[in-house]
Amino acid sequence: MAPGDIQAFTADDFTAPQAFENFCYNGGKPLGGVIAGKSVPGSMNAVIDVINPGTKEVLARVSEMGYDEVNLAVEAGYRAFQGGWKNTTLQERAALIMKLVELFERDKEIFLACEILNGGKVSELAHGDMGAVRRTAEYFIGVARETTFGDSSVQRVRRGLDGYTYAEPWGVVAGIIPWNYPVVLAAWFMMPALIAGNCILVKPSEETPLSALYFAKLADEAGFPPGVINVLPGRGELSGKFIAEHPGVRFIAFTGSPGVGQSILRAADKHGTRVKREMGGNGSAIVCADADPELVARLIGRNANQHFGQTCSTIHRVFAERPVFDDFVDASEAFFKGLKIGNQAERGTQLGPVINSRQPQRIIQGIELARANGAEPILGGGRASVPGYDGYYMKPTLLRSKTWSDCNPAEIFHTFVNVQPVDSLEQAIQCANNTRYGLGSSVWTKDLELGQRIAKRFRDGTGQVNCHNTVAPGIPYSGQGISGGPGAGTNCAETLRDYLQVKAIFVSDYPG
């Protein structure tokens, strides 16, 4: 592979289909939440403008769900659960899920519009996200077929005493989904929760609720009983808080920031609700002395710019051995300088808008903090203007700093990379692990055995050799440090078990 062959994720021209426009317009009324198969306007009389971050155009207006709606959704979920859903066979649940997948693929252009126009993604990345729905559904259906539901085999504990386990769904479970990968992360929650036999509450981000609401529309068409799939749009500090505090929600899967995840855990713990959390990262990359600095700089740059750095395990910190450090920095500068900043729906764009009006200030604060701590700007970042578009555009940031300097201690969530020289791989590993986060890191080397030894030493849920932002069904995606919470990660066989409660049953002979 020649270095010049490696390009950033790039946009094609995209125009929303009329069906997307009609869905968003909704007869001139705000889109409601979906509870028991019906649109619900919400009792708080609060409406959220859902925008295109590249133009600030309002795409749709969505009603925010309050405590009353959360309570109604929990009640609807239990009616559906007790009314027959918990007694459906695995084959029946799998058939409904695959019908939902088929409808998703039929209406893929509508979901692409959600991802591109509302989420701000370029089409190359958005198209890749679409494949996750079928892959996730088929994977968890396969896992479920190998999973014991109900009674396990009986174990003789001692004479006259037998024991076994009994596995059943929790009942009503919730997924709190972030804005950066709304389709992928909704699928990662919905598919294992549903195939396990639960009824679900989906709380999409207030920034990107459209795909979840359209999923609910398709669920009704697919034939899911009312109340099995409920969607509750709203802000995390309100709708999300009400979900976390509700005693009827038995399990919560959360993806988002550490602060919000910790608050959800505290609220849910009042009722003993199980919570699984994935809470961002501050990804690192180690560049070994044997690596081609130009080739690796472009590969790391492509990953650091994936969704404009708005990916949970984005590379923000690079530790390059001194023999290749200068050449790596020069090649990185060339790559980031070459990124085409533009509207995400316009051909050729590689660096589009950040998600909302708050993100630019957070990015600027991150740049200021890094410089105050001694980082030298190579590309200084800051706001960008795109002719013809009034959106939230930012330039890439590339910094260099001294070894061990703590110049980006927090997740920046943009194309923001700080490069430090290291004198040895041992020093590089120590620097990479010197963070509160622990989601994903990578090492870049021709020596695959060396790379694997280093990857195993990362204090991260995912260690990668010559790749980054890597996921695959069957291999857990999880975090350590403040990046993760209890449970076995997502997108793996253990995930399905999270959505089942397992009870121990002992049976003794009647005394006498």
Image (cartoon, rainbow, N blue to C red):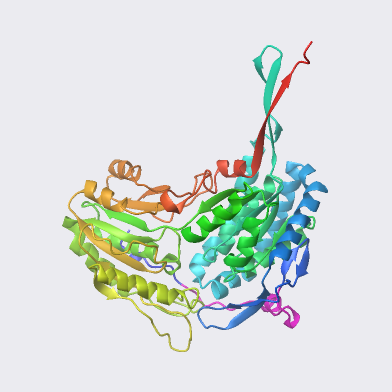
Q: Residue at x 31, y 52 (%)?
A: 434
> As drawn, is 247 to the left or to the right of 485?
right
- Quarter of the figure that contains the N terminus: bottom left
Residue 25 shown in magenta: yes
Asked whether residue 324 is in view, the answer is yes
**Where in the figure is residue 187, as x and y percent of width and height?**
61, 56
**Where in the figure is residue 233, as x and y percent of width and height?**
65, 67
Q: Residue at x 66, y 17 (%)?
A: 156
- Quarter of the figure that contains the C terminus: top right
Asked whether residue 335 is in view, the answer is no
> As drawn, is 427 to the left or to the right of 307?
left
Q: Nearer the viewer, residue 385 or 275?
A: 275
Snapshot quadrant of residue 238 = bottom right
Q: Nearer the viewer, residue 458 or 258?
A: 258
Q: How many marks?
A: 0
Which range of residues does the magenta coloring cover? 11-31
**Where in the figure is residue 69, as x and y percent of width and height?**
73, 64
Furthest residue toward bottom:
388
Snapshot quadrant of residue 377 = bottom left
Q: Nearer the viewer, residue 216 or 139?
A: 216
Q: Residue at x 34, y 46 (%)?
A: 458
Furthest residue toward front:
270
Furthest residue toward right:
83
**Where in the figure is residue 261, as x and y percent of width and height?**
52, 57
Residue 132 shown in magenta: no
